[in-house]
Image (cartoon, rainbow, N blue to C red):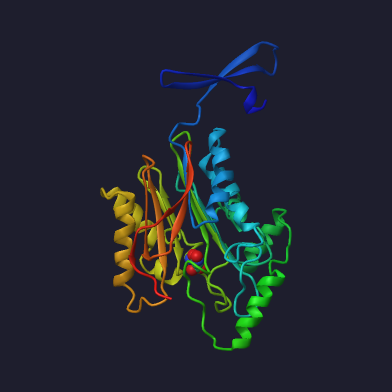
């Protein structure tokens, strides 16, 4: 039974659909099942420009009465599989040794969460994170254990270092300065996403190849529940992009959800979290952090330390890129 076979009964603000023609197991009589129709408030936001394409896929799931959790996974898969994106999945820039290592996590509306860190040779870490959440008693798997688990779950081994990422890494090595590139709007587009589905449930997720040319073994904020993402379905959800070391220090995403719980708007909560980033880091040079948040009502907000951060928004009416409010002007 396909969704387009459903008969939509929607009038005077009451929305319900009837599954027509569904036969019960033991009789040929039609059975009428009432399903909720995706609410008008369904929406998805994700970090950076690459979020536009990811949002489209996520939103299609939401408008077909899908779960926010599925929207997050399938939306983020798009960016992970995009060869051009050098911060996420295949094509991501490698660590100092030339190896691509991935971090990702996912969280649903019931505090269930799953995460993978330092995962090599698997194109879609967000899907592995979801399997960790659903098929194990754990929250986080790392390194070889995460890889073995993924293979056991039938994910394919894949070379993630593309020719162009390899060339960039070789150039970096040749410069031999041992300096990591700044995480700014030009060279970073890790994707973190929040979705609100037709049942009013929030989910969130994040996936990245992390800080380019990082020390081997380095893990950022993105797979850490509370730092890279957090969601409390009674309150709202938040997620982060930027320098993971700074985000972890203040448990950024969790802090924002708690601020919203205490009455802050998503925008104000993100701004206060950036204040905390400023207080907890002596040197703000080359330190970009951006947060996005959505509350239970579907109100959204964002804030970044420096200019240049933007995020993608999609609801029933429009898809757009929003320039984030920020604190400091980025100077090249
Ligand atoms: C990290 N937060 O590994 C990630 C990097 C990032 O846009 O968000 N880049 O620290």
Q: Is residue 199 above or below residue 231?
A: above
Picture coordinates of residue 47, whole percent (x, y): 48, 56
Q: Is residue 82 left or right of residue 52?
A: right
Question: For the view shown, which residue lies furthest in the bottom direction?
Answer: 176
Give the residue at x 69% y 70%: 161
To which quarter of the image does residue 18 belong? top right
The number of numbered badges drawn on the structure is 0
Picture coordinates of residue 309, whole percent (x, y): 43, 61
To which quarter of the image does residue 80 belong? bottom right
Q: Is residue 154 above or below residue 326?
A: above
Q: Is residue 35 left or right of residue 167?
A: left
Question: For the view shown, which residue lies furthest in the top direction?
Answer: 29
Give the residue at x 70% y 15%: 26
Q: Is residue 9 above or below residue 56?
A: above
Question: For the view shown, which residue lies furthest in the left direction?
Answer: 263
Q: Is residue 195 visible?
A: no
Give the residue at x 41% y 66%: 289
Question: For the view shown, which residue lies furthest in the front direction?
Answer: 332
- Of 48 and 135, the residue lying toward us: 48
Picture coordinates of residue 270, whole percent (x, y): 34, 57
Query: Quarter holding the N terminus?
Result: top right
Q: Is residue 109 left or right of residue 98?
A: left
Query: Quarter holding the C terminus?
Result: bottom left
Picture coordinates of residue 190, whole percent (x, y): 53, 62
Q: Is residue 216 visible?
A: yes
Q: Is residue 182 above or below residue 274?
A: below
């Amino acid at each position: 039974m396909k969704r387009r076979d459903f008969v939509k009964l929607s009038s005077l603000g009451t929305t319900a659909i009837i599954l027509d023609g569904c036969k019960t197991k033991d009789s040929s009589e039609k059975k009428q099942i009432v399903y909720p129709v995706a609410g008008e408030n369904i929406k998805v936001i994700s970090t950076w420009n690459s979020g536009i394409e990811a949002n489209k896929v996520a939103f299609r799931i939401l408008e077909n009465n899908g779960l926010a959790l599925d929207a997050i996974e399938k939306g983020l898969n798009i960016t992970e599989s995009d060869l051009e994106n050098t911060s996420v999945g295949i094509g991501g820039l490698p660590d100092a040794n030339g190896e691509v290592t991935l971090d990702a996590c996912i969280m649903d509306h019931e505090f269930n969460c799953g995460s993978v860190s330092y995962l090599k040779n698997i194109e879609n870490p967000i899907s592995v994170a979801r399997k960790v959440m659903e098929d194990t008693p754990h929250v986080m798997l790392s390194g070889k254990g995460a890889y073995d688990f993924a293979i056991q779950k039938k994910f394919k081994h894949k070379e993630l270092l593309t020719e162009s990422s390899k060339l960039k890494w070789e150039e970096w090595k040749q410069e031999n300065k041992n300096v990591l590139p700044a995480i700014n709007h030009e060279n970073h587009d890790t994707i973190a996403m929040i979705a609100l589905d037709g049942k009013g449930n929030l989910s969130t997720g994040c996936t990245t190849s992390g800080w380019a040319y990082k020390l081997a073994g380095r893990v950022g904020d993105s797979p850490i529940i509370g730092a890279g993402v957090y969601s409390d379905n009674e309150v709202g959800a938040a997620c982060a992009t930027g320098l993971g070391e700074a985000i972890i220090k203040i448990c950024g995403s969790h802090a924002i959800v708690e601020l919203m719980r205490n009455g802050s708007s998503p925008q104000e909560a993100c701004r206060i979290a950036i204040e905390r980033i400023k207080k907890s880091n002596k040197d703000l040079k080359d330190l970009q952090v951006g947060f996005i948040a959505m509350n239970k009502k579907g109100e959204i907000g964002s804030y970044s330390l420096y200019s240049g951060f933007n995020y993608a928004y999609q609801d029933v009416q429009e898809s757009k890129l929003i320039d984030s409010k920020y604190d400091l002007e980025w100077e090249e």
